[in-house]
Amino acid sequence: MKILLSLILTSILLPFVPMSASAVVGEPFVIVNKATNKVAFIDDNKVQNVYPAGTGRSNELTPEGLFTVKVKAVNPYFRKKNIPGGDPRNPLGTRWIGFDALGTDGRIYGLHGTNNQASVGKYISNGCVRLRKADIEHLYERVPIGTKVFVTHSPKDFATLAKEQGAMK
């Protein structure tokens, strides 16, 4: 009787259980490694691309953990200084891929372009991840909303990190 009741409850409640927060093999996955200031795009069970990146001026500024892409924008508006999207002064560049770090809604932390290409590869940002224009535009086209983003500070290679997170076999 207990087993039958358990099966009934499981079949009723299972549709209401949130999806796993982990990566899924074969689906798009992004890794930001603050130790190397590089971003990897994982898809179809392999590392597809690796891009240089700029991350937080201090280790604490770019939050670490497994996050989810919540917002994407072409020519994002820079609210902090009231600079419209597409303006050459806009430090966010041409694309924004926002994720839910520290319980935010994808509008605070993200991967984005930059109007200062020389900043890419450095510890320079207030927490976001900066990419070169061509790199963020390439990544933007391949990363749907819902994609997992893993931010870490690790000596491990991207394939190992992806396997540990469940994004690769």
Image: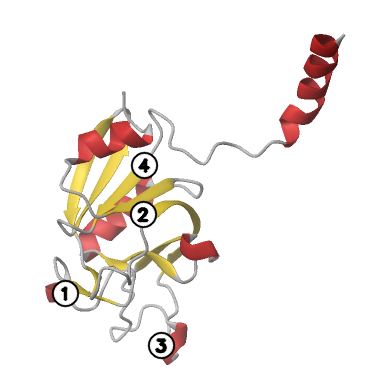
Look at discs 1 and 3 and give the one toward the viewer: 1
Look at discs 4 and 3 and give the one toward the viewer: 4
Nearest to N terminus: mark 2 or mark 3: 3
Residue 29 badge:
4
Q: Secondary structure at mark 2?
A: helix
Please provide percent x and percent y for residue 13: 78, 30
Q: Residue at x 19, y 78 (%)?
A: 116
What type is the residue that disc 3 sits on? Ile
Decide if residue 43 is on the left or right side of residue 120: right
Q: CA distance from mark 1 to mark 3?
A: 19 Å
What type is the residue that disc 4 sits on? Phe
Q: Residue at x 20, y 62 (%)?
A: 53
Q: Which residue is mark 3?
A: 83
Q: Residue furthest bottom?
A: 81
Q: Are marks 1 and 3 in contact (CB under 8 Å)?
A: no
Residue 119 badge:
1
Residue 140 badge:
2
Q: Are marks 2 and 3 in contact (CB under 8 Å)?
A: no
Decide if residue 161 is on the left or right side of residue 149: left
Nearest to N terminus: mark 2 or mark 1: 1
Please provide percent x and percent y for residue 163: 30, 31
Look at discs 2 and 4 and give the one toward the viewer: 4
Q: CA distance from mark 2 to mark 4?
A: 12 Å
Nearest to N terminus: mark 2 or mark 4: 4
